[in-house]
Amino acid sequence: MKAEEKFKEDYKYGFVSDIEAEEFPKGVNEEIVRLLSKKKDEPEWLLEFRLKGLRQWEKMTHPSWQYCEVPPIDFQAVTYYAKPKAKKTAESLDEIDPELLATFEKLGIPLTEQKRLSGVAVDAVFDSVSVGTTHQEDLEKVGVIFCSISEAVKKHPELVKKYLGTVVPAADNFYAALNCAVFTDGSFVYIPPGVKCPLDLSTYFRINAKETGQFERTLIIADKGSYVNYLEGCTAPQRDENQLHAAIVELITFDDAEIKYSTVQNWYAGDKKGLGGIYNFVTKRGHCLGKNSKISWTQVEAGSAITWKYPSCVLIGENSVGQFYSVALTNHHMQADTGTKMIHVGKNTRSTIISKGISAEKSNNVYRGLVKIMPAATGARNYSQCDSMLIGSDCGAHTFPTIDVRNDSAVVEHEATTSKISADQIFYLRSRGFSQEKAISLIVNGFCKDVFKTLPLEFSVEAVKLIEMKLENSVG
Amino acid sequence: MLEVKNLCAKVEGNDILKGINLTVKPGEVHAIMGPNGSGKSTLSKVIAGHPAYEVTSGEVSFDVNRKQINLLELDPDVRAKEGIFLGFQYPIEIPGVSNLDFLRESFNEVCAHQGIDKLDESAFRDLLRQKLKILDMDERFLERDVNVGFSGGEKKKNEILQMAILNPRLALLDETDSGLDIDALRIVAKGVNALKSKFNAVVLVTHYQRLLDLIVPDYVHVLYKGKIIKSGDKSLALELEKRGYDWLIEESEGKKQ
């Protein structure tokens, strides 16, 4: 087997499903946005929301402050809407195109009634649309709404209208504005007061169509005293061209509510020479509006040619808590500029940041963070720990922390380390019977432990495997 | 069991070993002594396969079930799985990896290679408990990260614990006694003695007689400038304790002239 073929095998999600898609013409303009809104049979207010986003975007220029090289993107060469052609409208999950079901099954996400995963409800997003959501009836019984955002616009317009864009407005950044204009689907969650969501909720994002961007939008609202554990996974076929994924995730927690949001990101990262791969430009932010509310982000970023995202928390309610746990692994020519922002607004707000960056081969890994303590945030506390690990000598690790404190009572701690896996460390493990690869994965997994332990069990097992697979053959 | 013939090795361009000959048979304890910089640690690292050391000539063969293996052809992890154990002078820290997981995984790697069935969780725990007891170690050791925050003595005990679990055919202990107080030294020696059998062998690299009072060697070798200049029985170590190395060095250099 040739080395390249071996490498192709390493990304087992790189297959393409033969599903005919209904696509829009390439490019983005007012006509496309109107067409999209019409296609989705949207109310007037949402069309206005989109057009506002478009006008905002047209005024903006592509940012350049990031510490990664983003090749110029021709936004008029991207297809903004691709929907798998349905033979007829599916009334239930069992009526979905078998080819689509087979695709998700191959990805480990069975959707049909008989095979679906127990204990976790899944919303499956394929290119631009949600193809189905499992366990909806069970969730409805306790008043939890979990559906695609398109469905939510139709069934729960009052909730969507009230909260959409309140956490990440169109003017927030270039890609947020673009997303506002052209977002196609994504998940919507509402947890009513006092309800602990009985199932974990999960969205699985799959890009399949060629030269298509995926612009999804997720909105999760946890009402007073509620709790939800939300998981997100993503994969895409192997292609030589780059594909754009520009999503927005908005979280809102009211008094005493908690959202735990975990991501295992494994978009196609391009080949060894840096050809192809997904551009993962995502805006994720949560507002802890209520007292004692909590938002916790955990991310394992192991894919994408470029990852550019900062899941953040705005801690508005008194005693609210924000957490960010991240493992970002880059290999070959991958680039990651990721981190978080913790904005302390309310009294006695607390935040924790644990970031672990691992760079191998010729990759570049950046932690960028902001801890901001506003004047009213008396008694605010932050603890940040940013550790970088280098494997080999051609890679890079960079840390750009910003601390902005405007209240004297705040306590802000920042710790950072950079380490390199040493030959002695590897020899020690090898002299105990571990192969070179196992030795490295043991060291790396140990390095990431503080983050992995915050993941739900199945996710943490998957994350460990993913990191091992990504590092295979990368250390010679 | 181990046959080292005319072994020469260098690191970073410096010749360190300049023709070592050493034969170790099952059931034997050998002590390697010698002044600082004579190549004692290098010898144990080369036998264990440290990639930084380049073997320039010579042979190292290892006898496993009456089969001769050329150790120099094997990766260090394969050497470990064949039953070579190197006790480190400076054990390495591995943050985030618990001692328990480390020991279990290591044990499983060796078992899988040698065709021995893995132990289930409770049987493995039993084995651990038994070994911990010999070394007077608390079970809480198992929950701590490998060597992280361990005192010098704890690190050395942890090496012997690993050795006890892996049950090697040949143990190379590189200055295991350095940095130990009297009590810890006794415990470590007790651990090594408890593991000795007629099927395995121990090579001790040490500076001090105090270890050899507790682990009595069958042979003592003095290494100087990359060569063994003198071999003898345990009385040689006692003589070195009294007289130092100078007389031997003079003797060997005199021979050359």
Image (tube, rainbow, N blue to C red):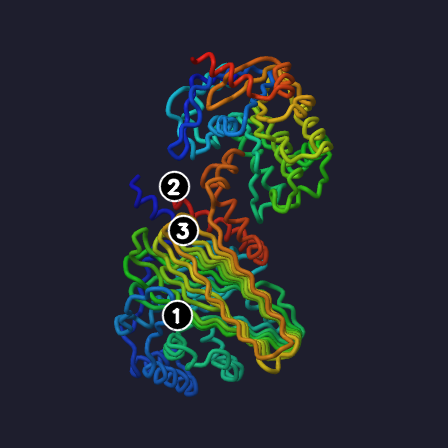
Q: Is residue A58 left or right of residue B118?
A: left
Give me the residue at 60% from left, 27% from top: B207
Which chain is indicated by disc 2?
Answer: A
Q: Where A258 sits versus B8, above or below?
A: below
Quadrant where the N terminus of chain A lies?
A: top left
Q: Residue at 65%, 19% (x, y): give it.
A: B242
What amino acid is found at the position of numbered circle 1 in the picture?
A: Ala
On the same chain: label 3 and label 2? yes
Task: Tell whether label 1 touches label 3 (CB within 8 Å).
Answer: no
**Residue shown at the point (42%, 22%) measured from the top left:** B18
- Answer with left or right where residue A140 lies relative to residue A204: right
Mark earlier in primary sequence (3, 1): 1
Q: Is residue B106 above or below residue A303?
A: above
Judge left or right: residue B3 versus residue B140.
left
- Indicate which disc residue A476 carries: 2
Nearer to the camera, B153 or B1: B153
Query: Number of marks in the image?
Result: 3
The residue pinned by badge 3 equals: A360
Chain containing mark 1? A
Tell me the quarter of the picture where residue B142 sits. Answer: top right
* Within-10-Å neighbours for mark 2: few <14, some 14–19, many 20+: few
Q: Position of residue B145 (x, y in %)?
A: 61, 46
Query: In this figure, which residue is indicated by the disc labeled 1?
Result: A246
Name the spot of residue A459 as percent of width and height, x first: 53, 55
Q: Are marks 3 and 1 on the same chain?
A: yes
In which quadrant is the C terminus of chain A drawn?
A: top left
